Structure formats: C-alpha cells, structure tokens
Amino acid sequence: MRAASRPACLSPLLLCLCVLQRSYGTPSPPSPTFTHNQTKLPDGDKDSHHRPKRGWIWNQFFVLEEHIGPDAQYVGKLHSNSDKGDGSVQYLLSGEGAGTIFIINELTGDIHAKKSLDREKKSHYVLHARAVDRFTNRAVEPESEFIIKVQDVNDNAPKFPDGPFSASVPEMADIGTSVFQITATDADDPTYGNSAKIVYSVLQGQPFFTVDPKTGVIRTALPNMDRETREMYSVIIQAKDMAGSVGGLSGSTTVNISLTDVNDNPPRFPQKNYQLYVPESAEVGKAVGKIKANDEDLGVNAEMTYRITNEEGAAMFSISTDSDKREGIISLRKPLDYEKKKAYSLNIEGVNTHLDPRFSYLGPFKDTTTLKLIIGDVDEAPVFTMDYYIMDVYENAPAGTEVGMVTAQDPDSTRSKVRYSIDQNAEGDALFSIDVDSGLVTTTRSLDREEVAWHNITVMASEIDNPNLVSYVPVTVQVLDVNDNAPYIATDSALVVCEGSKTGQVIQTIRATDKDNFANGRFTFALPDDLPANPNFTLKDNEDSSASVLARRQGFSQAEQELYQLPVVVWDGGEPLLSSTSTVTLRVCPCQRGARMPVCRAQAFLSSAGLSTGALIAILLCVLILLAIVVLFVTLRSKKSKKEPLIISSEDIRENVVTYDDEGGGEEDTEAFDIAALRNPAAAEEMRMRKDLQSEVWRAMGTEALSPSLTVMDEDIHEVIKLKVVEADRDTSGPPYDSLQTYAYEGRGSPSGSISSLDLPDLQSELDLSEVENWGPEVQILSRVFQEKGQQHAP
C-alpha cells in the first residue's frame, strides 16, 4: 500500500528504525520532511506488537485559508495498496471538522474542504483515516492520524493594540536620543512568507523625530529642542507588512512626545532696584516685605535661595525662601529706631539650588538686585530700662514697705512724661501698689512666705500725651524668709518596736519638719528636762538634723503592753531660736524576718483588734451553727407547706364518706377545716345562739362542774344517735346533701366525767399565779392562758 505523499522512511536503515519504534510503541520524532503519525489497531485486535504497513502513512496536508471559489478546495487523497479499484475498499474520515469542514470520497479517498477556513482562528486540524472492506466491514488498514494545516495568506493588517502612546524626552537632548520603542502586531503567520514582516516609518513628526524601520525605536532628529519654546509634539508612526512592499497592509498610531524640563535658564529679577517703606514700630522677627526672581524652568529646576550679601543689611534684616511661591521673605532682625537711622540698603542675590553641569556654559545661574528700605517715624510707647525686674521683700513686713523701683522712658524725640500702673488682670495686684510718677513698688499688706513665696505682677507705662501707647514689663517679687515657725516631728504613724529588740538597739531614726526655709540652721533633738527619765527608750541626737530612738531595755512584749509614748523636744537654728515638743508613739509587735525596716507580722494586726485566734474560731463556729438552724427551719416550713390535701379522692364528696387518716393538731390547731363555711350566715348565727343557750341551761341547773356528756348518762348511745339524726333532718340551714355529722358525744364514761376543763365553768384556784413567773418560760405561757380564761368568765 502507498500513500499519496512521500514515504515516511528515506532509506532501509530508517525503515528498520521506524519498524522497531512502531513495534515497541515509541513514536519517533518528526522528520523535517514529513510527519510520523500514530496508528490505532482495529477494533478487537489487542496485539500491542502490531506493525502497520508502511504505505498507510503520509505527510501533512495543506489547505489555503480564505478560499472563496465556488467549488470545494481539494486537500489530498488517501489510498491503500489493498484497493484494487473494484470499489470493495471504503475510506472513512473522523476527527476535527470531519463531515462538516472536510469531506472524503469513500470510493476514491479524495479529501475536500467545503468551507472557507481562517488560520487566525484555527491553524490546523487533527483527523483519523480508516480503510475497511465495504462488504464485511473489516479493517483493511488500521486507523491512522494525520494533520491538515491551514496555509496563511496576508489578510491581517498590523495593529497597535495599546495605542495611542505617550512618551517624554529631556529638552536640549542630543541627536539620536532614544525616546520610545513602539511595537505593532500582525495576526498573520510570521513563519510563512512576508505576511507578518513589519516595517515602521514616520508619517508625521519630521524633522524632529525618526523611527527605526525594524525595531520601532523613536529617536530625536534635531539638537537643542527647547521646552520653553515648544513642549508637546504629536508623532504618527506607520507599520506596514510584506516588508513594506507595494500591496502590503498597514496600520498607524499616534505617539504624544513631551519635552521634560532641565535647568537651562537662570533666575532673573524683573527690576534691578526696589524701594520699601518700613515703620520703626515693626516687630522683630516679623516679615516686613517680599521679593521674587523669575525662573522659566519648572519644579526643582526653578528652586532658588535668596541671601543678603552686604554686611550692614544682613545685620539688621534676614531673608528666607518660600519654597511654594519661590519668594524671598524679608524679616526684621533687630529693632528699628528712626532717630538713629532713617534708611537701609540691601543687596539681594537669587541662586538656583539644583545646577546641571551640562548647561554651565549658559552662564551663572544667579541674579542680583538692590532693595532700599526707608524707615518711617512712629510715635512709640515708653521703653523700660530692663526687660524684666526681680525684687524681694521680707515676710511679715508691714504694709507700705518698699519693694523696688521700675523706670521707663519715651524713646521719641519729644521725651514725653511717663505714668506707671499695675495691670489689674495680673496676679498680686491686691498685694502691691506703685507710685504713678516714680515707679516705686510697695506692699499693701503683710506677706507670708509659707503661703506664697513668689509673686508675679505686670507694670504698665504709658505716655501722658498719648495714653493709648502702653508698654508692659514683668516684675517678680520674692518673699524672703524669717524664722516664724517652730519645727515639729510628724507623728502620723507609730514607730515599730520589735519584741526581740535589745538594749541600746536603734529603733528608728526620726527627722523634724519646719515650714521655714532650712537656711535657718540645723535641728537639735533632746528629751524634755522637766519629765522623769523614760525607763524604756532614750534619744540620741545625730547632729545632722536627725535623731535616733534607742531601746533602754529588752524583753518588750505585745501581750504585756503594745503602745508607748516618748515626748521629744526639737529646736531649729534660726533667729530667734524656736522649739516644740512632739510625742512619738511606739508600737510593740513581732516583726518579720529579713526586712530592711521593722515590719509587723500579720498576726499582730489581729491582736490589735483585741481578738485572739481562739476567739475568732469560736465566732466562726457560732455563725455556722446559726446558718444551719436557719436552713433547717426553712426546710421544715417548705415541707409543711407541701402537705397533701385532706380530700384525696377525686369523686364527689356528696356521695362518699371520706376517710382522712389525718390527726388533728390538737387545741393549738387553728388551721383545721371549719364546716361552718358550708352553711349560710343565718344558720351559722342560729347555731351559735343555740350553743350559748345550752351553756346558760347548764349553769341554771347547777352542773357547771360537770361535762355535757353526763346529761345523757342514763341514755344509750343508740338513743343519742337517733336524736341527732332527727335534729339533722329538721335542720333547714344544713347543706342539701349527705354529710358527716359530728355529735361530740363521748359515751358513758366514769361518774367523774371528762377530765378536760375546756367546757367547764371557771374554778377557783388556790394557786398563786404570781409565783408562776419564777418557774420558767413554759409555765409562764400556761399561766397567761389561765389568766385570760378567768377574765373571759368573770361576771
């Protein structure tokens, strides 16, 4: 079998290599002349060592893009050596575009493209070919893969996808300085023909710029291009394919090129002479004028500094540069005095700060001008001889004591008279006064250094002819100290004495305090002479304004005595000599070990409260017992409140006799069920009157000491029940349903009757109730019950 293209192997050696590579499943690399295609075994053939026939392999097919003819474009032909021309072999095509783009004649194997193709959309198609027996449908040739490549035609013009562009180049640049590189793209195949070979040219922008035809680099074409003359250039660049030949397609874009600034222009003052008026009252440090030099450059290239070159002008004035406005700010360095000098001349120079050595040949980048300052005469306020005054006065001095004097003069030639006063808004105006003519400052009352040691006042001076011109000066008055306060020892806290202190041991060092200035001398300490010697402690003067408290014995115990008192006398060294007696408290306690200063242990604080450890434990146990009693009481009350209801049956009480199985609370039970709630108020009142009547009958019969049960002593219980039934049936006030009747009949008992005294009339007791008060709280309650009972039955 032989393909329509050239054989895949060029020599017997290559043929053998191809066969070996096919046998082991390893594809050979593509040759420069043809493509070695993989083949697939027929369906059902699992032999991995199958070798396809040499003739069923062919080179790539090619088809031109953008075909516009009326007929389908011929691509190539498939042919098998097994095809005898009798139509028994059928050629089949599958893969990308098979049947839609590419069609095959099943008898002849001719392949055609029935649609126009675009290489820029898809450059090649991968297809698979098979040859089968038309009658048996068995594979004559194995499936083989091949490629149809779309050949390019020049149907795309060059484009600048990122245009238009912006670029810049420094002014005054040399010829050939690179400005910008521009690149066009062409969608055609760069490997085939000249369809994508681009050449660049300048359509607009000559003679200022040129472009490299191959690289697209734009360069300057003229020297000394000045930004101050022209800053912007619009350059149009064309890109043409087919190497720029006739018939090639082209595209263009615009490149906007701006010239950036360089320092090629020096500063220039618009005038060579200026004149400025400055009043002599101008404040020192404040601006009195401005001056500006022009520079045609931009940014840092136009930055400059100003300076005064002559010594006289620099001594009186200073100049600084405003970087934003590029102005020179002239300020006053010293006060002006019209009477001394009426005019000044300043030589001012402006210099660029950022110089470019490439343009030094253009001359010095600086300029000078002259500024004449004319000083104006102004009526000025009085001037004090000093910028501030410091005075002093002793404390406790009487009112009217002289403190000091201030002096001010009119600086003008008229020398007007000056008046003095104290600023009423300043501190100390009520403590001092000033003579309006001489400026003498005096006190208005006695001063105390311990209250305020320094006073600040402000003195004003004004001209009599022009009171609006006022000047101020600060005056500080120091109050000098005199020894008018006795020293004392601060006794805010007690000194700690350790229980283990020994004889002669230093307990602590004490110091004195004096409100007066310590310049009055050091302090002296001693024990009072009018008191007997202290047996526990003594005092030692350290002669350095401190004293040490010493222990005169050992064996101090907090349990025996905790606090001690030690009077101490302290003298100062002032004039006159002052002293005072202070009482130092010393506290005994067990101290912590290892501490630098004596510190009591924690248990010492418990002892100071008067409570021992045992007492605290007892108090804690009592608190716990009280808490337990409260919890038990709350628990019992909650159980009582949750008691089950008396009626445990859910049936109607009118149809049943309910058994409660619950004992009453006795005579103290006031919460029991009262059947009177089931009766109407009229019946309840009738029952109460009936009981009262029965009690009166008993009294009339003289049977007060007998129980009601004895009235029916001889009757049988059956008779009693019958009597009660009849009473219940006749009782119209009772409930209209069966109920449980309580007859309160004890039956036949002993002749003595009931031992209960609740229903008996009062008996005369031989017991003296006043003696019961001494028998205890239980008997006292019983006594009060008898007393109340007697009061109820008293006639």
Image (spheres, rainbow, N blue to C red):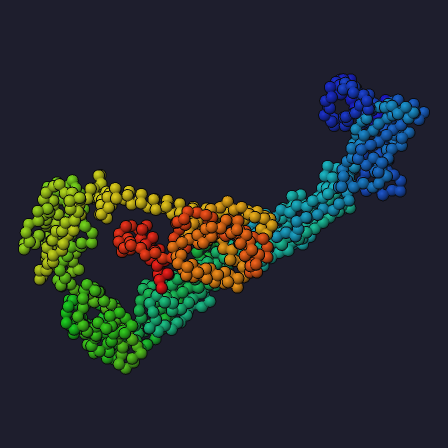
Q: Single out the residue that lies furthest toward the bottom.
A: 465
Q: Is residue 473 visible?
A: no
Q: Position of residue 190 (x, y in %)?
A: 72, 39
Corner quadrant of residue 204 = bottom right
Q: Residue at x 84, y 38 (%)?
A: 100
On screen, 166 above or below 474?
A: above
Position of 611 with respect to 233 (left or right) is left
Q: Position of residue 781 (x, y in %)?
A: 33, 53
Corner quadrant of residue 124 = top right
Q: Position of residue 242 (x, y in %)?
A: 74, 43
Q: Residue at x 34, y 53 (%)?
A: 782
Q: Single out the residue that lies furthest toward the front.
A: 714
Q: Position of residue 302 (x, y in %)?
A: 48, 58
Q: Residue at x 33, y 67 (%)?
A: 284
Q: How many marks?
A: 0
Q: Single out the residue that lies furthest toward the right.
A: 86
On screen, 91 above or below 596?
A: above
Closer to the camera in the image, 368 or 487: 487
Position of 103 with respect to 179 (left or right) is right
Closer to the camera in the image, 236 or 527: 527
Q: Is residue 333 visible?
A: yes
Closer to the camera in the image, 22 or 657: 657
Q: Assign the N terminus to one quadrant of the image.
A: top right
Q: Assign the C terminus to one quadrant of the image.
A: bottom left
